[in-house]
Image: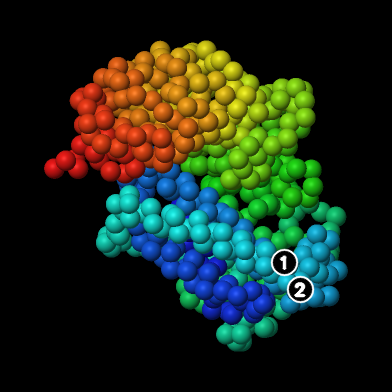
Amino acid sequence: MAEAILSVVLDQLTSFIRNEVEQEVRLVVGVREELNNLHTHLTLIKAVLEDAEKKEIHDNAIKVWLGQLKDVMYDAEDVLDEWNTRILISANGPHVANRVRSYLLSLCACFKHVGVRHDIAHRIKGIREGLDVIAHSKNQLGLVQSHNHHEEPRQLTSSVVDVSVIFGRDHDKQEILSKLLCETSQQETQVRTPILSIVGTGGFGKTTLAQLVYKEATFELKIWVCVSDPFDLQGTRGLKYYPRGSIERLSQLRTLSKFVVSDGSNKGSVIGELGNLNFLKGSLDIMGLRHVKSVNEAKEAQLQKKNYISDLWLNFQDDIIARDIGPVSNEEEIRRMEGVLENLEPHKESLERLVIRYYAGSTLPTWMRMMSNITSLSLYYCPNLMVEPHYLFPPRLETLELFYDVGVLSKSLMSLTHNNNLKSLQISSSPHSSLPQGLNQLTSLQQLTFYSCEFLDFKPEELKPLTMLRKLEISYCNIITRERSREEDWSILTHVPIIEIDRKDIKKSRN
């Protein structure tokens, strides 16, 4: 997943640098340098991705690093897509004006202002700074470049094309455009979208021709989707929204990385469009669940029928990197979100990992207890969670990750003390200063990680009851790392062979 999105961003960056598109932001100093720095960082990071994805299974810090990388990549692709859209609209002017939605026209109008150019440049700089930290961390994590020689996967593409270096395709391009526009005009009242295939041997220029058509086609809404041989939809996180009604027609779709629920505008899709996509496999991230209007609407997603989904992300916010649950006006709205989550019940046997993000409800779904194969549960910022009975959690849960404020679970883990399978616990960005009650009763724990808990402070003896613990990781927890960074500070935990403080194994360092 990380390699797919990184490859797309690298492809876009290469095109931007090659095409001298920085002319559109000529008044902003240093944009080209920022793009080059981004490209360099991404190239170096891509070289160690294979090593990172192998190690994340056993190293929570690397798993967090990969998550941070993906978040920055999603932001980068969004900015580059927006930049490219503004450039295309600005370049085409009135030719596009009659066919593009008003909000895109407003982008075109404002793009000539220095303020907008500075905004793009500022956002690129912010992404580069975030990537600086990630690039630096890869060395601390001990990630190495892979030297395995294997067949390269099919390259993901974007819609960006340099028309100045393409010759002899005008006739083909015009023929396709004519056919598309003709069929569209004749079928305006019909639901189906005309599909045209470009067939040819490898290297014939099929993708380039499609890019030329995409650049000049003047439909109200366009998306570029890179489709691999088994018709898997990849690189879709960079597509902010899909045309209304377009996804549900792809009934044989195998992979859909991200699905965005419409907020009531023309952006996004109705969640019921997932109903027919029963061949989806692997990971599915549904975003914007706060916009699902009713319990019945949630049922229309028919997640129970998707028996190839192993990794499910249920995100109630629109933004991947949101930091709160957003405005919640009343108790009725909270109850609605609880009902939505309850009625997004997935297939009982296929699901292995469940992630719930930015959820305003006070209770977790009752169907979790029936998910016989869930071994990993991640909760991101669910501040209203109340006491959960122990029988509600998946019976085979082995890994629990708690990010930010997760309500009562940030304060007490007593409801998990009956679980004898829990092997790994990660607590990140906790708002509290003490360990959750009951943590030292989770005696089956083998790995315990605290990450970026700036207020957390506890004594090593509090972890002594965890007799099965084999690895303790503490990173970016300022109070602990400042006051207890030596081996003698943790000498009471003689049974724990690995204790890492800010990536340094303090037991090994004595040698």
Query: Who's the residue at 47% across and 46% down the image?
Result: 67
Q: Is residue 215 shown left or right of residue 74?
A: right
Asked whether residue 101 is in view, the answer is: no
Q: Position of residue 319 (x, y in %)?
A: 63, 45
Amino acid type, mark 1: Val
Please tell me which residue lies in front, 128 or 58: 128
Disc 1 versus disc 2: distance between alpha carbons?
7 Å
Q: Which image quadrant is residue 95 in?
A: bottom right
SS for tag 2?
loop
Query: Who's the residue at 84% across and 61% down the image?
Result: 102
Q: Which image quadrant is residue 104 in?
A: bottom right
Please tell me which residue lies in front, 7 or 441: 441
Asked whether residue 167 is in view, the answer is: yes
Density class for disc 1 (Cα within 10 Å; few <14, some 14-19, many ≥20) is some
Q: Which residue is mark 1?
A: 116
Asked whether the beta carbons under mark 1 and mark 2 sit within 8 Å of each other, the answer is yes
Q: Which residue is mark 2?
A: 112
Query: Who's the residue at 45% across and 21% down the image?
Result: 436
Amino acid type, mark 2: Lys
Q: Does residue 98 lie above or below 172 as drawn?
A: above
Q: Is residue 388 shown left or right of residue 223?
A: left
Q: Position of residue 37 (x, y in %)?
A: 47, 69
Query: Who's the residue at 21% across and 24% down the image?
Result: 495
Q: Position of residue 379 (x, y in %)?
A: 52, 31
Residue farthest along the bottom direction in this orientation: 168
Q: Is residue 71 shown left or right of residue 47?
A: right
Q: Does residue 193 lie above or below 320 as drawn?
A: below
Q: Position of residue 415 (x, y in %)?
A: 47, 14
